[in-house]
Every structure is written in C-alpha cells, then in structure tokens.
Amino acid sequence: MRLYATFSVLTLSTIGAVAACSSETATPVETPDAGGQDSGSDAGASNTDSGPNDSTDPDDACAAKASASACAICCQTNHQQGARTFTAAVIDCACGTGGAGPCATECKTTLCAAQPSNPDQACSTCLDAVAKEGAACFDSITSACESDDDCMASQACLQKCPAN
C-alpha cells in the first residue's frame, strides 16, 4: 500500500483539536436518488441519457478539483473518520511517547506541543520523510490505516488527486 498525505494541508481539524484555516471549502456532491427514475428519454435513435452524471462515488468530485490541496481537503471531508485515524497515527509515531518520536524536535512547537497547532514547514518536511515507505513511521501508520476501512477509502481518494 502506498500511503499518501499532503502534510502542507494536514490540519489538526481532522482530529478535532484545532480549527483549520483554509480558504478552500469542499463542494457538496449530489448523489442519485433511490427512486431510480431515468431522467432521459428512450424515444428516438439515441441511447444517451440526457440526465446528470449518476456517479455514486463522491470521491470522483475530489479528483476533479483543480489542485492537489483542494482534492486532499475534499478527501478529508468525505472520509473524516479515516482522516482522523491517519492523522492520529502520524502524530502518535512522529511525536512519540514523551517527545521521543522522530519528528519531536521539528514539531515540538506545533504538532507535538502540549497544545498542538498545525505543522509548520520544518514539521511538515519531517512528517513527509517519516511517513514514506521504509521510513520510521510507515509501518505503524500503515497498520493503523489498514485497520480502518474509512482510512483505506481516504487513501484511495487521495490516490486520485492531481499531482500539482
């Protein structure tokens, strides 16, 4: 499994600790109604449904976002429990017990502080490094995420995000 996180947009709001300060908001996604009524016409030679796209996957709207940041926020919104699981696993490993984690120094005034705040650039850089495959926190983050279906769905959503 390839874990994906954009720590530049990682906010503690995903675990309920701090409100995110973002100018981007998630767009609500319409889901098809349970009635199954076709909005198109069967008359004529065309087999094309004239109704709206009936995609049942709200993550498709995330993938259509213009930026990786907007997509990541959308995925966090669609998979709040999964985002909380992932974020908590990152914090647990990166900060460690008693400040002994691999990012404890870089994140001591932000994410690992007694009153956590969103990570600054130095902390984000460390988080990116320790979450990579084979790095210090990869196995514990992977284990936590694999035990939560919504975390796995969140990761699948993030895989669809644009690279920019």
Image: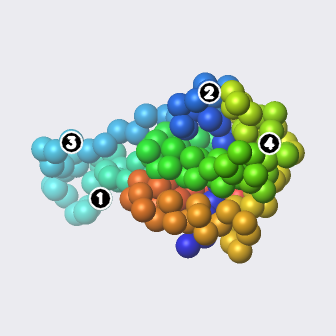
> Disc 4 or disc 2, which is closer to the eye?
4
Q: Mark 1: which amino acid?
A: Thr
Q: Position of residue 53 (x, y in %)?
A: 35, 50
* Disc with the residue nearer the chain's start (4 vs 3): 3
Q: Residue at x 41, y 57 (%)?
A: 148
Assess whether mark 3 and mark 2 are in contact (beta carbons under 8 angstroms): no
**In this picture, residue 45 sits left or right of residue 130:** left
**Residue 48 tag number:** 1
Question: CA gap, disc 2 to disc 3?
Answer: 35 Å
> Disc 2 or disc 3, which is closer to the eye?
2
Towards the viewer: 11 or 94? 94
Q: Residue furthest front?
A: 98
Q: Position of residue 66 (x, y in %)?
A: 65, 45
Q: Which residue lies under the disc numbered 2?
A: 18
Question: CA gap, disc 1 to disc 2?
Answer: 47 Å
Assess whether mark 3 and mark 4 are in contact (beta carbons under 8 angstroms): no
Q: Residue at x 80, y 39 (%)?
A: 108
Question: CA gap, disc 4 to disc 2?
Answer: 15 Å
Q: Mark 2: which amino acid?
A: Val
Q: Mark 3: which amino acid?
A: Asp
SS for callout 2: loop
Q: Which residue lies under the disc numbered 4?
A: 107
